[in-house]
Image (tube, rainbow, N blue to C red):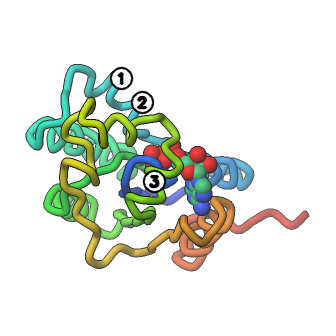
């Protein structure tokens, strides 16, 4: 574990784009390589660290700033982190990038609103389109795509395993994770 280098994989993308799914595959792969990893999943954070916050711009920004704060604490102490929250606003993501410097790797988990709505994993898009849920990112609230992320995961055309594999390859290239053990 001593050779772990701290970094933050900052996942951003619409609800249902694949952030949670891909983060779990990356976690398994890193653990297989005896690397640590902490995931700060948006839904999980909203149940504890950010409990009580809503979806106004102010509350969303507070939520993301808290996630960035914890990701910075962990990653500067050598713990790899994945944050998996929508993080819709470019300005706040850029703030996190500034805080973490070269430990910050922005990962755009990309899928269109139409595809995410078709998947509708949590049944939220149906409610957003009917107006039952207000301020829903991509439907009735903004999502600002990253302008120059370190990597774009094309989840409409890749499998989750392929996306995770490309991300792992990037980490290997940057020598941020231990090499895979020979079988
Ligand atoms: P998010 O965390 O971004 O809200 P989830 O990971 O919870 O998204 O849901 C994504 C859904 O899309 C899952 O049901 C997953 O099985 C499905 N899916 C289909 N193709 C892909 C892909 N290439 N990458 C990630 N998820 C995919």
- According to the image, label 1 marks what residue? 47
Check if mark 1's residue and mark 2's residue have beta carbons within 8 Å.
Answer: yes
Check if mark 3's residue and mark 1's residue have beta carbons within 8 Å.
Answer: no
Identify the residue at image location x=62%, y=69%: 158
Q: Residues within 10 Å of mark 1 (few under 14, many from 20)?
A: few
Residue 104 visible in rendering = yes
- According to the image, label 3 marks what residue? 116
- According to the image, label 2 marks what residue? 44
Identify the residue at image location x=29%, y=37%: 130
The CB of the residue at mark 3 lies under 8 Å from ligand 1: yes
Identify the residue at image location x=19%, y=27%: 53
Secondary structure beneath label 1: helix
Secondary structure beneath label 2: helix
How far apart marks 3 and 1 lie (CA) works out to 23 Å
Q: Between residues 112 and 108, which one lies in front from this camera angle? A: 112
Sequence order check: which comes first, mark 3 or mark 2?
2
Sequence order check: which comes first, mark 3 or mark 1?
1
How far apart marks 1 and 2 lie (CA) works out to 5 Å
Discs 3/1, front: 3
Circle on res. 105: none
Q: Between residues 55 and 81, which one lies in front from this camera angle? A: 55
Discs 3/2, front: 3
């Amino acid at each position: 574990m001593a050779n772990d280098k701290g970094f933050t994989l900052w996942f951003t993308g619409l609800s249902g784009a694949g952030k949670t799914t891909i983060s779990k595959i990356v976690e398994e792969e890193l653990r297989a390589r005896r690397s640590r990893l902490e995931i700060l999943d948006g839904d999980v954070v909203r149940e504890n660290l950010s409990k009580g916050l809503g979806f106004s711009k102010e509350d969303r920004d507070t939520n993301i700033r808290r996630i960035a704060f914890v990701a910075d604490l962990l990653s500067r102490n050598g713990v790899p982190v994945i944050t998996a929250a929508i993080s819709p606003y470019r300005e706040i993501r850029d703030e996190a990038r500034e805080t973490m410097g070269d430990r910050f790797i922005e990962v755009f988990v990309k899928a269109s609103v139409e595809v995410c709505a078709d998947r509708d994993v949590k049944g939220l898009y149906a409610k957003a389109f009917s107006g039952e849920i207000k301020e829903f990112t991509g439907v009735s609230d903004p999502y600002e795509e990253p302008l120059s992320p370190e990597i774009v995961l094309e989840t409409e055309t890749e499998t989750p395993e392929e996306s995770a594999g490309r991300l792992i390859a990037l980490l290997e290239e940057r020598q941020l994770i231990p090499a895979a053990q020979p079988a």
